[in-house]
Amino acid sequence: MVSYKEYKIRKKKLRRITARSIMIILNIEQSGATIYEDGIKIGECMFEINKKKKNMEVKDFDIFYPYQGKGYGSLFARILIALAKMYHLKTSTLTDGASLKGFWKRLGWKNMRDGSNKLELK
């Protein structure tokens, strides 16, 4: 059950998504994910799950230009975070070279002392 406050927050974050259908394909064996809007590929991501270190390394996260700023990236990243939690991982490391200004910081990633960018999963 989702509270009204959570519903308002979710509705606000996804208000710019106008697609009739969104499909996200997670290929665990090939360590990749792709997002489609109405059958058109709009983004992709490569990731690596290390069960021994309990870490997911996010690489090459990309939402194509015409679809940026509409909430697709946040939705896609939240799906990856949910995947990491499903595998009972403790951290997620961002290695795609993106700065932590804005997008990644809003999703909870932080700069660590060792120079890496990590998200602690709870």
Image (cartoon, helix red, strand yellow):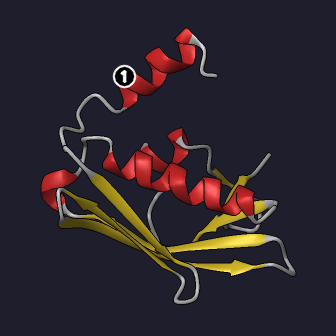
Is residue 100 visible in the rendered structure shown here? Answer: no
Residue at screen point 43% across, 42% down: 102
The N terminus is located in which quarter? top right
Q: Secondary structure at mark 1?
A: helix
Residue at screen point 37% across, 52% down: 73
Within the image, what quadrant is residue 60 found in?
A: bottom left
For the view shown, which residue lies furthest in the left direction?
66
For the view shown, which residue lies furthest in the right direction?
52
What is the tally of numbered marks visible in this picture? 1
In the image shown, does 56 or 24 lie closer to the viewer? 24
- Residue at image mark 1: 12
* Kind of residue at disc 1: Lys
Neighbourhood count class around disc 1 (C-alpha, 10 Å): few under 14, some 14–19, many 20 upward: few
Residue 28 location, x and y as percent?
57, 80
Residue at screen point 72% across, 59% down: 86
Is residue 64 visible in the rendered structure shown here? Answer: yes
In the image shown, does 21 or 61 lie closer to the viewer? 21
In the image shown, does 82 or 118 lie closer to the viewer? 82
The C terminus is located in which quarter? top right
Q: Is residue 36 above or below residue 30?
A: above
